Amino acid sequence: MNFIEKIKLSMTGVWSNKFRSFLTLLGVIIGVSSVITMVSLGSGTRLVVGGQLEELMGRQVALFPNWNLPYTQQGVLSLEDVDYLKESIIGAEEVAPFYRGWFRINYEGREYTGSVAGVVENALELTNLKLEYGRMITESDLANHEHVAVIGQRTLEQLTDNTDFASFIGKEIEIDGNRLLIVGVLGIANASVVLSNDVVLVPLTTFRDLWRWYDPYNFLITYDSKSTEEDIINQIEYLMNDKYGTSRGQCKFMPAGIQKEINIYNNILKILILVLGSIAGISLLVGGIGVMNIMLVNVKERTKEIGLRKAIGASSRDIQSQFLIESILLAGGGGIIGIIIGAGFSSLLNFIIAHFFEWWQGYIPAWVILLSFGVTTFIGIVFGSYPAYKASKLDPIEALRYE
């Protein structure tokens, strides 16, 4: 008996019990469609969250005084340290000083306590912040200690109901009793390691003039793609310990980055996808057990048929391959139908979510389609092997006598 004849005979066996075959297929269909749906939603979540994390500009390390030490023992950064670190750190691209504090911000009678940062002219290039209207702080502003500000949309939303943010260019705000001219408005962007959307940027020199009592400089250090955050932090600690010494066995400064947190989040998202897929995969296992149960019933019901076929010359291998092919057809057929239903349902679900949430980026990974088909075929082989083997070992005489 050739392979084509075996397939035809197996299809006849499957088709002879339509309702039973359908119920067997149903378990596999539900399992496959559940896996595809779960993985699709998980992958969409990872794409959205992962994309936002990537925009955080992870190759940054902020350097602060070590807040874990008493105030008098904390390190004090100076502008001389800018060149010292930039020239000494292998892989460093930029070292920029900045101030950051929280102050009362007033605009036309409304008050909001927000973040104010004193920055240099290339602050936007070093962070993820985006200029939407007007201009950024310039070298001239720094040199002349100008009372100008670039304000974030998030801060303006707290101070006014006017959403025409471009109209604020040329107007004044009051920060801690000091009036500053708005020259730029920041758009919406993901927060960086040190600055976020609800910030007001002022020239570094102006910040120092207005709040001389404030904490010493902080630094923002960016590094190239060949370096790692851990290596940069280790270099910073070594260099600062070498120059300023330690206190209580600790570095007087605290370098902090976000790449480690980004990696943790990415790993969590990967685990989430695996967990969702595994939970849905349990139903595939149940479907496989259903395939084996049905095949055992088939063997029992067709015992006389097996005996007759053996009596007229069919080999044990022919019997075994016939029932194994039937099992693969059941599981594989259910897998194909499950893929179609799962892909259709996932696409519909992603479309609905995207309709309500524009940021949603759900999709169906190609690997889950291939994996689902491969797993269902494997299930057909594994769970069909025992019934097929049992059928092939039946004694023809005993089988013909079976009632």
Image: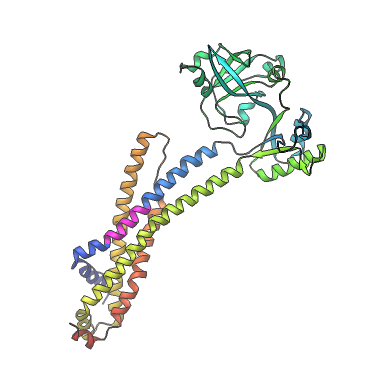
Q: Is residue 280 magenta?
A: no
Give residue 302's quadrant in the image: bottom left
Q: Determine whether, in the image, residue 207 is placed left or right of residue 113.
A: right
How many numbered marks appear? 0
Q: Determine whether, in the image, residue 300 is placed left or right of residue 251.
A: left
Q: Residue at x 31, y 70 (%)?
A: 292
Q: Position of residue 54 (x, y in %)?
A: 54, 39
Q: Is residue 27 magenta?
A: yes
Q: Position of residue 261 (x, y in %)?
A: 58, 43
Highlighted range, magenta: 25-35
Q: How is the image coloured?
A: rainbow
Quick one: 193 or 116, which is closer to the camera?
Answer: 116
Quick one: 66 or 80, which is closer to the camera?
Answer: 66
Q: Residue at x 40, y 44 (%)?
A: 363
**Residue 143 visible (yes or no):** yes
Q: Position of residue 240 (x, y in %)?
A: 78, 38
